[in-house]
Amino acid sequence: DQQVKQNSPSLSVQEGRISILNCDYTNSMFDYFLWYKKYPAEGPTFLISISSIKDKNEDGRFTVFLNKSAKHLSLHIVPSQPGDSAVYFCAASAYSGAGSYQLTFGKGTKLSVIP
Amino acid sequence: EPEVTQTPSHQVTQMGQEVILRCVPISNHLYFYWYRQILGQKVEFLVSFYNNEISEKSEIFDDQFSVERPDGSNFTLKIRSTKLEDSAMYFCASSEQGTSNSPLHFGNGTRLTVT
């Protein structure tokens, strides 16, 4: 049951260029989308999020775009830096009404930024 | 910056043994979670905890699993009788609120190896 899909397991980008990481989802009840970054031997670190009522959110070099009709979101990193090399997880949430919510993660995309 | 801490970083145990994984969430956070990632697979939700009780749990979180907040700072995950398939990276997380726009902060994980 892959409600959140990241179809590219890996991506290589030259330093200074744009990195575009893609994510698709199937559950129309998701109301928030998040990107997490993960380095080896560390836990996922929150990067940026977007509400389902918006189509773009920008934070410095990171921009997330949401296309609700296509059930697609993407993370743009520009300019890419070698320190951005990590695994990027797309995650989505739907409030359960039980006092908390759970995240559904994609499998991740390993980004390598080449100096 | 406050962080979620998990101990131990690596736990090796024999099948059938009980293990307790420990977490210290961020001090002003009220919502606590356990997720796990089997090698090569997705990060999966196990359980959420609020106000000293389980808010939500996944199908993975069967009777072998339990969580506890024994002393107001620690948050533990107990696996009563470990199985080989319990081998995974277990991540603890906390959030300030239980809403979709309150990002989860993850610890660095405990790698559980069941032999």
Image (cartoon, coloured by chain):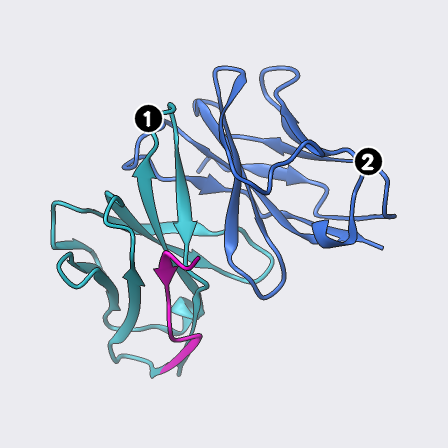
Please state the chain letter of the residue tagged with numbered disc 1 in the rendered image.
Answer: A
The kind of residue on which mark 2 rests is: Glu
Which residue is rendered at x = 63% and y = 39% of the image?
B6
Note the chain letter of the cyan one: A
Q: CA distance from mark 1 to mark 2?
A: 32 Å
- Can marks 1 and 2 be said to lie on one chain? no
Q: Which residue is at the front of the view, A43 or B66?
A: B66
Asked whether the viewer can see residue A61, the reply is no
Q: Residues within 10 Å of mark 2 (few under 14, many from 20)?
A: some
Q: Quadrant of residue A59?
A: bottom left
Q: Is residue B40 magenta?
A: no
Kindly identify the residue that appears in the image at 30 percent across and 70 percent down. A21
In the displayed structure, A71 sits above or below B101; it is below
Q: Quadrant of residue B31?
A: top left
Mark carried by residue B18: 2
Which residue is label 1 attached to? A97
User: Between residues A65 and B82, which one lies in front from this camera angle?
Assistant: B82
Residue B70 can be seen, yes or no? yes
Q: How many marks?
A: 2
The span picked out in magenta is: A1-12
In percent of width and height, residue B26 lies at 49, 29
* Chain where mark 2 sits: B
**On residue B55, which mark appears?**
none
Where is residue A23 shown, x and y percent of the image?
Answer: 30, 64
Secondary structure under tag 1 reads: loop
The reply, left or right, for residue B64 in relation to residue B103 is right
Q: Is B111 above or below relative to B49?
A: below
Q: Examine the image and state in which quarter residue B115 appears.
A: bottom right
**Chain B on-screen colour:** blue
Tell me which amino acid carries mark 1: Gly
Q: Is A67 drawn above or below residue A12 in the view shown?
A: above
